[in-house]
Image (cartoon, helix red, strand yellow):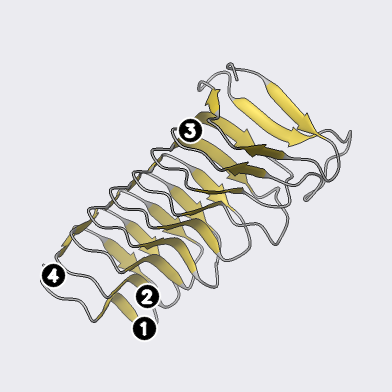
Amino acid sequence: INAGVRIKFSADKGMTVNGTLKANGTASSPVRFTSKEPTPLPGDWTNIALNGMNNVLTYVNYDYATDGLTGDNADNTTIDHLTMNGTLSLTANGIFLSDSDSLILTNNYITTAANYGIYATNATGSNVEGNTISTNYNQAAIYMENCDNCTFKSNTITNRPNRGIYSRYSDNVLFQGNSLEVQENGIEAREGTNHNYISNVITEFEEHGIYFYSTSGNK
């Protein structure tokens, strides 16, 4: 999909990608996925599901869907400069990928209302950097499970979600330069080893800035 293309979906329609999706927007000419309705409302169309590897989405605006980007087995996917700016359904997460490793999730702006801004499982070797996420999620702004050798860097989280970054079953993880305004725990790390925490700023938490549970070798 070339820069500047606008794709409009009718009611109850969406896109399931069982191969590879490449949306090549630019800062001045983003790709837009949106509603076909003349007066669009949240939930006008369903969503985009990525069920294949090597997707590349850059400078994409994503509006008025029932859910955010979902998918399975989307290894080696890059999502950069995605904007979800509060127009999705109240049941929508942002990026929700299962069994997807080596993800590059960078410079995204996400304001959704369900449980997660970014969610991924079996996400070994992923880089989550420079994202801005602003909603009071009842789970976590960022949740990554089985995320060995992952990096969480320079993310900004505001509006006090329950957790800022939640990493589970993950070894050799770097948390660096994140700014987290949260309700309960800024960084929650469970069942992992060898975590590095460098220059994170965590504010407004009521429980823990950094919460360790069954972790070891941290510094």
State which mark lies toward you, 4 or 1. 4
| Residue 14 drawn above or below residue 168 | above
Disc 4: CA contacts within 10 A as few (<14), some (14-19) or many (>=20):
some
Determine the secondary structure under disc 4: loop
Q: Which residue is mark 4?
A: 218
The amino acid type of the residue labelled 4 equals: Asn
Nearer the N terminus, badge 1 or badge 3? 3
Q: Which residue is mark 3?
A: 55
Q: Nearer the viewer, residue 17 or 186?
A: 17
- Residue 16 vs residue 81: left or right? right
Q: Which residue is mark 1?
A: 207
Q: CA distance from mark 2 to mark 1?
A: 6 Å
Q: Which residue is mark 2?
A: 185
Residue 76 image point, x, y percent: 38, 38
Tags 2 and 1 touching, CB below 8 Å? yes
Nearer the N terminus, badge 3 or badge 4? 3
- Residue 205 vs residue 116: left or right? left
